[in-house]
Image (cartoon, rainbow, N blue to C red):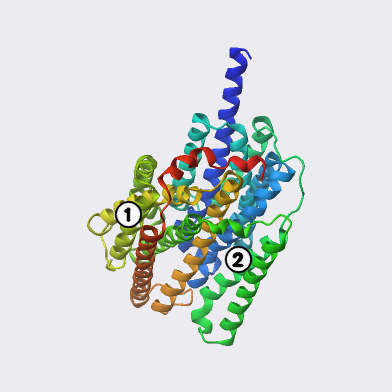
Amino acid sequence: MTRQSVGNATRSRWGALSLIVIAQFMVVLDISIVNVALPTIKSDLGFSEPSLQWVISAYAIVFGGFLLLGGRLADLLGRRRIFTIGIALFSLASLLSGLSWSAGSLVGARALQGLGGALFAPAALALLMTTFREGKDRNLALGIWGAASGSGGAVGVLLGGVLTSFASWPWVFFINVPVGIALVIAAPRVLAESKVSGGTRHFDVGGALTVTSSLMLFVYTLTFADQHGWRSPVTFTLLVLAAALATAFVWIETRAEAPLLPLRIFRSRTLSVANVLSVVVASLAFSEFFLLALYLQQVLHYSAMQTGAAFIAIAGTIAFVSNATQTLVTRFGPRPVLAAGLTLLSLTLAWFAQLPDDAHYGTDLLVPFLLNGVGFALCFIPVVIAALTGVGPADAGIASGLVNTTRQLGGAVGLAAVTTVASSVSGLHGSAIGSVAATDALAHGFRSAFGVLAVLGLAGAVTAWVFLRPRPADIEAVAEEELVPAEAA
């Protein structure tokens, strides 16, 4: 091969990575960019206080519920093809979200966005694996991809504030449309097609539908249990139905020809514990960003732009500290780093639980925001590394998909739970908020929710320290095992 052809191949690979990273950044950013716009969306579309979280949860649940199926479709039908279809669907759903005329139409469009994301996100990661060989280049590519995943959520809050202030809330969705169109046009020119040849072409649709339906029903029950009453027949019936669907999912997975989630993978204690901790970290991240955005605007009366600017302390710290986190994990292992991060998160959340109704940014918020960013930076990377530690090459792709799934679904369920706590404690179930008494009640509800999250963070830290004990040799093996079977899943 000539020097020129080598150079062209290199440019092609890094061009493909640029496309994949932009897509990953967009799908992660879309989870958080809506947070700052929530009060305006609530007012314009008539959401109630407890139902507002469905703007986030509908996206996250469908996204997480269909991730494994999306990866399977990409492997068998073509990764570039599914990537392009997913991007197109995501862009269309973004347009529909911005054009929404009611609460129900927005929730439906957000669910469709989640389905589009579930198609192209695993396809994008598989394309990265087939584009870069094992070694230095693949590790660098994975690092860039991981940075996009880690920073997208934090940047979304800031960008949401800018768009809501200088345009209007629909633009937090419209911004995806031109980016999506550009990606669809560029994909066949930049990305090489790849798929698994031979083998069974079985799709575990039943598994995807039962697990997603179970989680949506469970989230619905959590959200409205304070209205129906925890002892009411309605609540009991919904919980039984959710449990029945979850049981059906397990039954299907034990008998499916090509299950979405082979249950044997849970024989690894490290993997099981890491995925539990992934749920905890996601619950803290989704819930905290949601609650803080509402606290700043509804209690402290910040504008959307001021709210976005306030989050710079968290977003900037996450981006800065994340650069050093992987080095810490390599040296000390994921257990102490993750335990330290969860402990720091628990302390800052306990700090938020004490915030007054008239908090000042410089004296009351800046320091806990900075420490909170450090805590999240110490959690995001170690929990993924822990979930892949000790996993054999045959299961590495499944393990990677599982940790992404638990992150999305854990965030949605955690958000529903703390929203129920905040709504129950405040006693505000309607959409009319504005009086001093209502503001005081809201603040009390937010503080109680932050207190619950602080306890959850502390429980996660103890769990990480006591149960997460991977062998040191496994940590170094992750770099070679990580996602290798994406081509043979």
Up-down relation of residue 42 to residue 315 (above or below): below
SS under mark 2: loop
* Mark positioned earlier in the residue sequence (1 or 2): 2
User: Callout 2: 10 Å neighbours few (<14), some, many (20+)?
Assistant: some
Q: Position of residue 85 (x, y in %)?
A: 70, 45
Q: Nearer the viewer, mark 1 or mark 2?
A: 1
Q: Quadrant of residue 108?
A: bottom right
- Mark yes or no: residue 310 visible: no
Q: Position of residue 155 (x, y in %)?
A: 44, 47
Tell me which amino acid carries mark 1.
Ala
Q: Position of residue 329 (x, y in %)?
A: 38, 44
- Could you say which disc has been placed on residue 340 in the image? 1
Q: Give the alpha-carbon distance from disc 1 to disc 2, as whole Å.
A: 43 Å
Q: Residue at x 58, y 78 (%)?
A: 239
Instruction: Return the residue nearer the eye: 256 or 452.
Output: 256
Instruction: Return the residue nearer the eye: 129 or 67.
Output: 129
Residue holding disc 2: 102
